[in-house]
Amino acid sequence: MASPTPTDTAAHDTSQIPAPEGSITVTVRVLRFNPEFDDEPHWESYDVPALPTDRVLNLLINIKSYVDGTLSFRRSCAHGICGSDAMQINGVNRLACKVLIKDLLAKGNKRTTISVAPIKGLPQMKDLYVDMEPFFEAFKAVKPYLIAYGNEPTHERIQSQADRERFDDTTKCILCACCTTSCPVFWSDGSYFGPAAIVNAHRFIFDSRDEGSEERLDILNDTEGVWRCRTTFNCTDACPRGIQVTKAIQEVKQALLFKRV
Amino acid sequence: MSAESLTLDKPRSPRRPAARRNNFELYSWLFMRLSGLALVVLVLGHLFIMNILDDGVHRINFAFVAGRWASPFWQFWDLAMLWLAQLHGGNGMRTIIEDYARKDTTRFWLKMLLYASIALILAVGTLVIFTFDPNIAG
């Protein structure tokens, strides 16, 4: 992926965006890329009105609705559940629907600038829209579903609260790719499984009802598996759900090391 | 498991090379931790003896080295330091090459160069420790 160029193109007419009472003007810089016209991504700036209680996603939707309808980004539920709008906001991976403008305001009377770029390490297809296929390929490769052999039980698969607690943290994953695309190992080696796939493997490896732990541990023991992790904690910092991602990866390493789940 | 459920395993996903099913990465990860711990003692001890104890570097000469290597303990110390540092550093370099080399051919040749240099230094160092002749000066 080409590195962002520092030159911003001409200002856009943003007067059509409604400015509610109490709003301030902030500059949103977006790393835009249109594969039909551009050779490489470039920054474009938009001066838009924003309320402190707005989310970054509101500003992007306003730009798309009132300034440039070709601005592309994913968003679905817009409430931090679907995990569609992961992007790099001021250099860190966040969900645009969970970051409030008041937390990004510049100190003093300085003009606030918010930089929005696509998540790193996945092919940028258009603007903030990236090809998620390599990410989901790694996810599928760890078999993220219940594996159980023998006859199906006639009643539910019972589990104690303590057994449920064992993998509670990793059930929270929404597959937004914030963690995987914040991982320096994933940036340089796209075939690394990445934190998200390991988190989802962890969710089943430590599930007492599941019988596929060994298969998954075997997969993660490989060259591109958990041993590539350098414990930089970028993934834990990035996770919008607060999952202790690095801890989960370490638990998988531990399970491999001591052959015990 | 029926054949049908096997074909539904990872539908339409691009193929990833099959896992090699060996513990090489596990052992190299473990080796890095253990050799690192050992090297903290070995290297700091070495630096202390060579640079701080008594008159430090000023007393080091051929006789000093000959005197130390007369003892199997120091021979073993230096041998352990040589092998652990070479393998620890070499494994670290291997990881860095895996991370940063962009082409497979670059990766392969950098690794070959690395392995050759590790083998050479290990061989020469081990040879010196075991065949050191204290009377060579005379």
Image (cartoon, coloured by chain):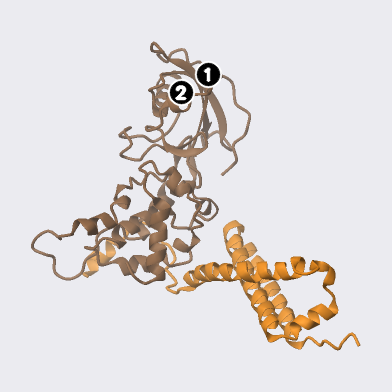
Chain colours: A brown, B orange
Rendered location of residue A87, percent (x, y): 45, 37
In the rendered structure, the answer to whether residue A210 lies left or right of residue B56 reads left
Q: Nearer the viewer, residue A38 or A232?
A: A232
Q: Which of B14 and A103 is in front in this view?
A: A103
Q: Is residue A13 above or below residue B35?
A: above
Q: Mark 2 lies on which chain?
A: A
In the rendered structure, the answer to whether residue A19 lies left or right of residue B68 reads left
Q: What element carries label 2?
A: loop
Which residue extends farthest right? Answer: B138
Residue A69 visible:
no
On the rendered image, what quadrant is the N terminus of chain B found in?
Answer: bottom left
On the rendered image, what quadrant is the C terminus of chain B found in?
Answer: bottom right
* Residue in view at x 40 percent, y 13 percent: A18
Rendered location of residue B46, percent (x, y): 70, 71
Which residue position holds label 2? A68
Q: Residues within 10 Å of mark 1 (few under 14, many from 20)?
A: some
Which numbered circle lies on residue A12? 1
* Residue in view at x 59 percent, y 42 percent: A2
Residue B96 visible:
yes
The three-letter amino acid code for the residue at tag 2 is: Asp
Which residue extends farthest top? Answer: A21
The residues tagged by marks 1 and 2 sit, at their Cα atoms, a distance apart of 9 Å
Q: In this view, does A22 lie above or below A60?
A: above
Mark 2 or mark 1, which is nearer the start of the sequence?
Answer: 1
Q: In which quarter of the image is residue A208?
A: bottom left
* Residue in view at x 69 percent, y 74 percent: B116
Q: Mark 1 lies on which chain?
A: A
In the rendered structure, the answer to whether residue A205 lies left or right of residue A68 reads left
Q: Are marks 1 and 2 in contact (CB under 8 Å)?
A: yes
Q: What element carries label 1?
A: loop
In the rendered structure, the answer to whether residue A103 lies left or right of residue A153 reads right
The three-letter amino acid code for the residue at tag 1 is: His
